[in-house]
Amino acid sequence: MVVDPYQGAMQKLLEGLHDFQATVFATRREFFEKLALGQRPEALFITCSDSRINPNQLTQADPGELFIIRNAGNIIPPYGALMGGEAATVEFGVAGLGVKDIIICGHSQCGAMKGLLDPPPAEQFPALRSFLGHAEATRRIVRENYKHLEGEALLTATVEENVLVQLENLRTHPVVAARLARREINLHGWVYKLETGVVFSYDAKVGQFLPLGQQPGAAITGIVHRAI
């Protein structure tokens, strides 16, 4: 029996593709033709692979406006620790495309952060366990400083601390460090709450994640973080 590869979920994706070509692309053909000539994104957006996050939808950014890195746990290994896709993309985004802002965006209910707190079995997920090792500082910070938390509050603290740790890792990349020294680039730490749609941004002045666009006093948790 021959199985149709375009059934179920694939059928839905195929229908979406046809709809894009017939409605979106057809009505914005000139825009997409200009994109084919080159890209000049405004920001590098680093976030989790989680299927519930859509960076362009979240920021209402058009194609061509965001240069995006996605992986489990929005992790950026320190420079030299893993010369892979993350390091290459950061380097090209900053030196090649000239992005002026880099955002690391974590999110609530993050499976990778749950895995950091309760590691998955090595025999089933060897690559995942190895990659989460680049967030070991997050795990250690949480284990030693948040013993009073559990459940949802502990996961929230882990998500937040991981954003800060990955920002520090990002600073070890020479191309980022050089631009920071010249004040030609800005780093931002965000946490997106899936349940509410609210995005919290880290405010180093008060040491908390605050709702974007709001004044201090409405932190995502009562946790006070270190300055970065």
Image: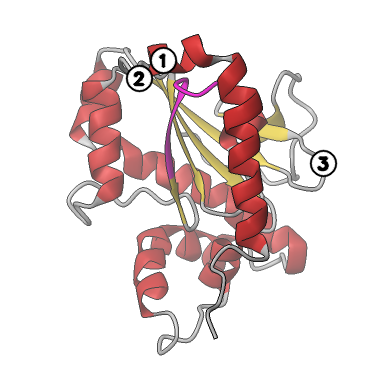
* Number of numbered tags placed on the structure image: 3
Residue 77, image x, y percentages = 31, 52
- Callout 1 environment at 10 Å: few (<14), some (14 to 19), or many (20+)? few
Q: Which mark is residue 33?
A: 1
Residue 191, image x, y percentages = 63, 41
Residue 100, image x, y percentages = 38, 16
Q: Amino acid at mark 2?
A: Ala
Q: Which of the two discs, 1 and 3, sits closer to the camera?
A: 1
Judging by the rendered image, the residue that carries numbered circle 3 is: 196
Q: Which mark is residue 36?
A: 2
Q: CA distance from mark 2 to mark 1?
A: 5 Å
Q: CA distance from mark 1 to mark 3?
A: 36 Å
Q: Residue at x 35, y 73 (%)?
A: 127
Q: Is residue 47 visible?
A: yes
Q: Secondary structure at mark 2?
A: loop
Q: Secondary structure at mark 1?
A: helix
Specify start and end residues of the magenta stretch as a single range: 61-69
Q: Is residue 172 visible?
A: no
Mark nearer the N terminus (3 vs 2): 2
Quadrant in which the N terminus is drawn = bottom right
